[in-house]
Image (cartoon, helix red, strand yellow):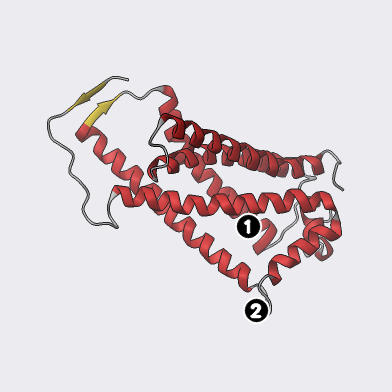
Amino acid sequence: MATSTVSKPPRARTGKAGSTVFLKVLMAVTGFIFVLFVIAHMYGNLYKLFDGHLAFNEYSEHLRTIGEPMLPRHGFLTIMEVVLGVSVILHIYSAVQLWKRSKAARPQRYVVKKSVAQSFSSKWMRWGGVFLLLFLIWHLLQFTIIRFNVGSGGDNPSITHDPYELVVHSFNVWWVTLIYVVAMIALGMHLRHGIWSAAQTLGFTPTPRARVIANTIAIVVALVVAVGFVIPPLAIAFGGIK
């Protein structure tokens, strides 16, 4: 890496809400919320889809009744959706602000020739995040908000209102499975880089040993989540789940 610095020192950001450190912490915390969610979501899909039609639909219904009678039907799920929705907005906001600051500061403070790995990692987190956002919108529309079936049977209510049948019919379409697999690979790469960056931001990597542990955790979590998510659609596509 070749670096040349200029004489003008960088100006520190003022105000907690406007500081770069605050934005990095905000991104790390909202990212951690997503990690917990995707692990739970992956486990439910992986375990219950292989358990059969009845078990998966009971699991889907149970998500809507958690907390009853203290909470109304769908109450806990609504709270979780609000938390995740706010986290999405804050995560995107902090990412955009950090990217804008980095882009604006680079020509003023220093000229850096990044390594190929650094350049790819930076671009991937940015554009991979955009791809994951678009996939998330598609995924929610298909399985939660509208519930449309692109497989055999079309929008037959007996399919679109049956969670198990909707999933099975959808992943019997090759291009739906392909999009999903590519998205899960992107998610795994995003998680690996995000968890590692969050560990650094939150001060969990003060020593070489801590850095090795954090990096290992990031890789393991990314692999477990990505592989766990792609197993069910591939099993459906190849006839293992019918």
| Image coords of residue 68 (percent x, y) | 68, 76
- The circle drawn on residue 154 is none
Q: Residue at x 73, y 51 (%)?
A: 45
Q: Nearer the viewer, residue 95 or 150?
A: 95
- Which circle's residue, 1 or 2, is located before the other in the chain? 2
| Image coords of residue 194 (percent x, y) | 48, 41
**Which residue was labeled with disc 2?**
72
Q: Residue at x 74, y 62 (%)?
A: 60
| Image coords of residue 18 (percent x, y) | 27, 54
- Asked if marks 1 and 2 touch (Cβ < 8 Å), the reply is no
Residue 103 occupies which quadrant of the picture? top left
Q: Amino acid at mark 2?
A: Pro
Residue 154 in sight = no
**84 w.r.t. 170: above or below:** below
- Of helix, strand and loop, which one carries label 1? helix
Q: Amino acid at mark 1?
A: Leu
| Image coords of residue 4 (percent x, y) | 21, 23
Q: Nearer the viewer, residue 142 or 230?
A: 230
**214 w.r.t. 118: above or below:** below
Q: Nearer the viewer, mark 1 or mark 2?
A: 2
Residue 158 occupies which quadrant of the picture? bottom right
Label 2 neighbour load within 10 Å: few <14, some 14-19, many 20+ = few
- Viewport quadrant of the N terminus: top left
- Of helix, strand and loop, which one carries label 2? loop
Which residue sits furthest left?
7
- The circle drawn on residue 140 is 1
Which residue sits furthest top?
2
Residue 59 in sight = yes
On the rendered structure, is 202 left or right of 154?
Answer: left
Residue 221 occupies which quadrant of the picture? top right
**Distance of label 1 from label 2 (alpha carbons):** 22 Å
